[in-house]
Amino acid sequence: MLRRIITAGATCVATIALGGAAVAADSPDTGVVVSESGAVTMSGSTAATYTRNVTDSDCAETADTAGSCTVASTVSVGAIGKATSTQLATDAKATSTDGTTLAAAAAARTIYTRTFEQSQRGLYYINWVEKHIGRVYFDKAGHVWSTTTTYGYKGYHTCDLGSGIGYSIKVTSCSVEKRYDLNGPAISLWDRYQVHVVASGIPIYQSHNMHANAYDGGTITFP
């Protein structure tokens, strides 16, 4: 049985596809580094993909009623490229952490862009998956942007790309957060969701989240 649920205001729009062969951790060619805590940093200019198992903190705080809190997580980034005139015109209203619009920065310097993708999949025969994709812009000069309905403009930040057999995915928040507490100008792109067991009259679910931190130099980290 397949059901998909999304709450009002949680949808961000557009879809993109990402490429990139799987790489080993700490790869010098692709800039993939995995910390002792399991966070994945992708700082290279080329496409890269990495898969790991993670235990979700939101899930661990709730009763383990919908399966394991450990999920298979795949993260990817696309190659860095120069933003096109069409992209810059479409997403001109995006603002960085200091209030600079993408349009204003594009008039002064080169703007770069890259895509990212995250997915989380249930383990141990739990047949569900949620995907989170997006596009970020950056200028290597202290600014990073992502277009999203959070800033009143539609663009490349999408949640609710999940599905399940015997489970349903309910996105509770799809948002972009301006960060002032990280090492350099950055934004966080969040996908918060619940995995519900499809059982009539029994509200059984677990809460999960995944997010990407995007920096002004093009690095994207997946905590």
Image: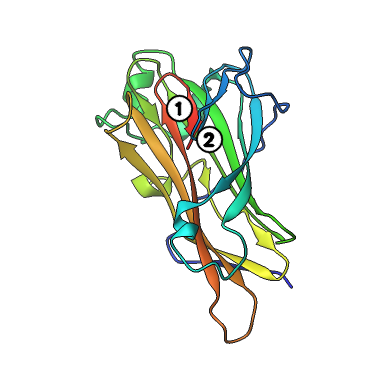
Secondary structure at badge 2 equals loop
Q: Amino acid at mark 1?
A: Tyr
* Picture coordinates of residue 2, whole percent (x, y): 71, 69
Residue furthest to the front: 36
Label located before the other in sequence (1 or 2): 2
* Picture coordinates of residue 79, whole percent (x, y): 61, 21
Q: Would you call the spot at circle 1 few (<14 residues within 10 Å), some (14-19), or many (20 or more)?
A: many
Q: Quadrant of residue 77?
A: top right
Q: In this rendered view, identify the residue nearer to me: 175 or 30.
A: 30
Colour mapping used in the image:
rainbow
196 versus 90 height, above or below? below
Circle 2 is placed at which residue position?
38
Residue furthest to the bottom: 201
Determine whether, in the image, residue 57 is placed left or right of residue 162. left
Q: In this rendered view, identify the residue nearer to me: 144 or 169.
A: 169
* Picture coordinates of residue 166, whole percent (x, y): 71, 71
Secondary structure at badge 1 equals strand
The N terminus lies in quadrant: bottom right
Residue 181 seen from this side: yes
How many discs mark residues in the rendered view?
Answer: 2
Residue in the image at 28% along x and 32% along y:
97
Residue furthest to the left: 98
Q: In this rendered view, identify the residue nearer to me: 57 or 90.
A: 57
Q: Amino acid at mark 2?
A: Gly
Q: Would you call the spot at circle 2 few (<14 residues within 10 Å), some (14-19), or many (20 or more)?
A: few
74 versus 175 height, above or below? above
Disc 1/disc 2 C-alpha distance (Å):
26 Å
Residue 3 seen from this side: no
Circle 1 is placed at which residue position?
137
Residue in the image at 59% along x and 42% along y:
118
43 versus 12 height, above or below? above
